[in-house]
Image (cartoon, rainbow, N blue to C red):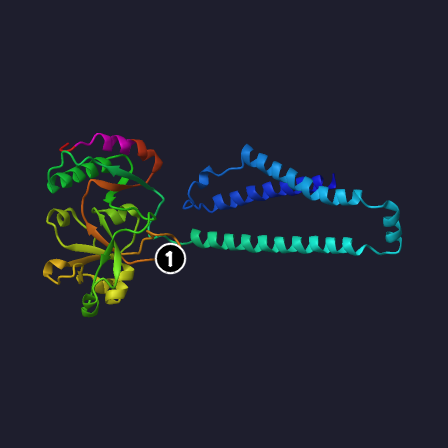
Amino acid sequence: AESLVIGLLGGVAGVALARAAMLVINARALSAVPRLDAASIDATVLGFAFLATLVSSVVFGLVPALRAARLDIADSLRAAAVGSATRAGGRFREAIIVTQMAVGLMLMVGAGLVVQSFRALAETHPGFEPRGALTMRVAMPFAGFSSANDVRAFHGVLAERLGALPGVTAVAATSQLPLTGQGPLQPYAYDEETARNWESISADVFNVTPGYFRATGATLIAGRDFTQDDITAGRRVIVIDDSLAERAWGGAPQAIGRLLQLEPEGTPESFAEVIGVAGHMRYHDLRREVLPQIFRPGVFLNFSLVLRTDGDAAALAEPARSAIAGMRPGS
């Protein structure tokens, strides 16, 4: 009975602590935590807490109860009168106390590390702004697109239709979204040594359409974004991240207008001009920067869309789906 009372009090305190922790987390508006808004203390959580409390109370209360039931009352009274205890009983109690302290210390250290890691991740800037952004994956059939001009025209009309939706401030397409893993690797060279040791260094490479950095909320540190003319004219231009700019030329301003070698032949066509430098975006995970990044202008039929809005991003989902579903080759 005593174990049940203590266990139930502990269960109530645990649920109350969980509720307080949720309020604190929501108050900090940590929207980067996936499905945080779906977390709640519902009947399932309360049922699990009650069952865990009941089982642990019975198990840990039953062991000393059974042990006490086997004791000889007369011997126990005589031992208590002289202020002594059996050696086996003393060792058992000492072992229980040491075990409880060890387990409690492990739980405290583990909880502290989890909280510290969570706090570090929550305060890490991913290089883009997830609030106000809607993303979706689109795959169009290849039938009906006979040339690259058809694909460019399709993307132009799609961007126009999506940009006309209420509240949309920017629209762009990309071959890969942030936090989706490593992209295709692109060897590069920026001086004679790296050109001589070709493929000794590589970067993640992504194809994007004009307006991508504004749509994702990324920071364009220097230079400019891509334009539709860059895609139409097939210009060899790229945007790199600040880590590549720092490594190759000592900083973002110095990188603008430089040529980065992207092919091993060394012909003029193997170089691309750096027109912009963006802040590094976390494509692998939030914990660290992994590889430098190169962004190229391009359009394609399998792509991801990014829509930025000054209102509720989730409310754009159905209108955006309808706009895309109405698109056909040549429409």
Quarter that holds the N terminus: top right
Mark 1 Cα shell of 10 Å, populated few (<14), some (14-19), many (≥20): few
Q: Position of residue 42 (x, y in %)?
A: 54, 34
Which secondary structure is most common in the magenta stretch?
helix
- In the displayed structure, 303 sits above or below 221; it is above
Q: Is residue 228 left or right of residue 163?
A: left
Residue pointed to by mark 1? 288
Q: Tell me what residue is drawn at x 49 percent, y 46 percent.
A: 25
215 and 298: which is toward the camera: 298
Residue under the image location 46 percent in, 37 percent down: 38
Please provide the residue range marked out in magenta: 319-328
The foreground one among 166 and 130 is 130
Q: Compared with residue 326, is residue 90 higher up or lower down, i.e. above or below? A: below
Q: Is residue 159 above or below residue 103?
A: above
Residue 261 included in the magenta stretch of the image? no
User: Residue 125: horizontal and vertical position, in percent?
Assistant: 38, 53
Q: Is residue 327 magenta?
A: yes
- Residue displayed at 54% across by 54% down: 110
